[in-house]
């Protein structure tokens, strides 16, 4: 099992969610986050006073999947969240040791 | 024939008085409040609100008398009014000023006395003690506003000389703007100025505030006719045209130079236009108002954006760049564009060939600037000795809402 953590542009969320649903992914957690990578920030000007805004708003989505789904999910996120412009985000994959569904006590593959 | 009360004039002036009060609370309070950082927004609102309360009482106790009642000594009367109306004691229901009750005239002028010190607060947002603010603005009303109002409107030396100031371009705006410049210099920069992020925390508040200022300004300028007639209507026309032209001028200048037409730029431009038309409304025709508006938008943009940077002072909310510069510009341009066809009391250079009026307007600007700057500086020094002007660095960094008022916004 793998935990996929992806940072994406906020306006791409709906497309990403739809494509993951189509793959059979059953759940997702979304968090509004701020950060920077190569895109850096932007500048705001108020009556001539310039302020660098170094952290940009992004969405962090977290999806837990079975190992065999990994490539398909990565492909889906990559293709749907991509604009080709700097600042499209990143995908992090980490191994997942255990999953428990709280309501039923089901574990691992049954709990995903 | 003895003067008689006119109910139409009285009805309009009751309305205009309410409109001008609306300019300070909540207009100016929101305009300034949106531009500061979240940790200081309540302290900024408190300045406008407290000024409203404090100036009301001081105006009743002594201000009105000093500004508008004659001094028994004709020599002294050129500079300051008399003490006949302390605590408004002689005011009766039947007393008239022109065609309206004197009580109403006193109330209308009170709303001007409220907004003028409140305007200065734009210079020391984020860093002045509340106690120092109260001492400063109270003393400033009596020692700076009342004398200058008397000079121009109460029969003082500028009045005698023939200076034109319809609704307070120099008495209110240049005066407050000058005081703001001196305050910014004496208080020093905000901690972190030039390095930290001091972006406005909520420009929505500022847009609402500027819009209320715009509407309230009809009371300010058209109310200064003191009657409900052609002069009020022409003054309202000039006010609307100048505000719109200045908003466009600032917006396009910024679009050209800084690539984006900012919302803060549009509302700053509108306020600059309103300031500049204040002395001229009621004296100029619509085309004159258009030129004054365009000039105000461009000149105040340069003053607030470039001059401030070049001179290096931290006039936090640009009370000088907008009100001081706009007020002086408007006062001078009144001499250029005043037309006896609009108001027989005002003969300007362009329409009537009266170049001398420009010189009188210049005296008006220089006299107001010099007196306001010097006495403001003296008051600041005295208040600094009494209670200290500035909060500690710790309080300034942590924020004024919590430290001065024990409250915060948004949880």
Image (cartoon, rainbow, N blue to C red):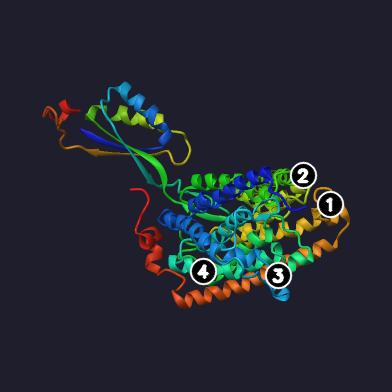
* N-term mark: 4 or 1: 4
- Write down the residue under mark 1: B340
Mark nearer the N terminus (3 vs 2): 2
| Residue B367's disc number | 3
**B193 with respect to B104 (left or right):** left
Q: Give the structural element (helix, strand or loop) at label 3.
A: helix
Residue B237, image x and y in percent?
Answer: 72, 43
Camera-side residue of B74 and B224: B74
Residue at mark 2? B286
Marks 4 and 1, Cα distance to the nearest angstrom? Answer: 40 Å
**C-alpha distance separating marks 4 and 3:** 21 Å
User: Alpha-carbon neighbours of circle 2 within 10 Å: few (<14), some, or many (≥20)?
Assistant: some
Q: Is residue B298 visible?
A: no
**Count of picture labels:** 4
Q: Which residue is mark 4?
A: B136
Q: Earlier in the sequence, mark 2 or mark 4?
A: 4
Q: Position of residue B260 (x, y in %)?
A: 60, 45
2 vs 4, front mark: 4
Whether labels 4 and 3 belong to a single chain: the reply is yes
Residue A68, numbered label = none
């Amino acid at each position: 099992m793998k935990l996929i953590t992806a940072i994406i542009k906020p306006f791409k969320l709906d497309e990403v969610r739809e494509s993951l649903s189509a793959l059979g992914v059953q759940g997702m957690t979304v968090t509004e986050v701020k950060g920077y990578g190569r895109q850096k920030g932007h500048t705001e000007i108020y009556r001539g006073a310039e302020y660098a805004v170094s952290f940009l708003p992004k969405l962090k989505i977290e999806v837990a999947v079975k190992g065999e789904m990994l490539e398909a999910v990565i492909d889906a996120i990559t293709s749907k969240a991509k604009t080709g412009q700097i600042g499209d985000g990143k995908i992090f994959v980490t191994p997942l040791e255990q999953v428990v569904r709280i309501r039923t006590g089901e574990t691992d593959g049954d709990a995903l | 024939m003895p003067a008689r009360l006119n109910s139409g004039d009285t009805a309009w002036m009751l309305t205009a008085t309410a409109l001008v009060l609306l300019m300070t609370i909540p207009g100016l309070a929101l305009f300034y409040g949106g531009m500061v950082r979240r940790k200081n927004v309540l302290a900024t609102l408190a300045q406008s609100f407290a000024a409203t309360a404090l100036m009301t009482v001081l105006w009743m106790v002594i201000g009105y008398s000093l500004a508008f009642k004659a001094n028994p000594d004709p020599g002294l009367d050129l500079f300051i009014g008399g003490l006949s109306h302390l605590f408004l004691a002689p005011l009766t229901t039947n007393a008239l000023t022109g065609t309206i009750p004197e009580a109403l005239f006193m109330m209308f002028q009170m709303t001007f006395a409220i907004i003028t010190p409140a305007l200065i607060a734009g210079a020391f947002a984020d860093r002045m003690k509340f106690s120092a603010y109260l001492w400063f603005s109270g003393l400033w009303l009596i020692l700076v506003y009342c004398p200058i109002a008397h000079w121009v409107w109460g029969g003082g030396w500028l009045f005698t000389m023939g200076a034109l100031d319809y609704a307070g371009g120099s008495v209110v705006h240049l005066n407050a703007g000058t005081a703001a410049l001196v305050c910014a210099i004496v208080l020093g920069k905000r901690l972190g100025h030039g390095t930290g992020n001091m972006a406005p925390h909520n420009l929505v508040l500022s847009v609402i505030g500027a819009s209320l200022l715009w509407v309230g300004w009809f009371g300010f300028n058209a109310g200064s006719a003191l009657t409900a007639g052609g002069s009020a209507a022409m003054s309202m026309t000039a006010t609307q045209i100048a505000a719109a032209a200045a908003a466009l001028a600032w917006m396009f200048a910024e679009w050209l130079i800084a690539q984006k037409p900012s919302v803060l730029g549009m509302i700053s431009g509108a306020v600059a236009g309103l300031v500049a038309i204040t002395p001229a409304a009621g004296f100029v025709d619509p085309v004159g108002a258009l030129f004054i508006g365009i000039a105000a938008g461009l000149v105040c943009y340069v003053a607030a954006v470039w001059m401030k940077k070049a001179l290096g002072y931290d006039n936090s909310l640009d009370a000088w760049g907008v009100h001081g510069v706009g007020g002086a510009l408007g006062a001078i341009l009144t001499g250029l564009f005043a037309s006896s066809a609009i108001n027989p009391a005002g003969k300007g250079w362009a329409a009537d060939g009266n170049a001398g009026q420009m010189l009188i307007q210049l005296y008006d600007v220089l006299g107001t600037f010099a007196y306001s700057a010097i006495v403001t500086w003296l008051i600041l020094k005295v208040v600094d000795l009494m209670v200290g002007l500035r909060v500690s660095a710790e309080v300034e960094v942590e924020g004024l809402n919590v430290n001065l008022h024990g409250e915060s916004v948004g949880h």
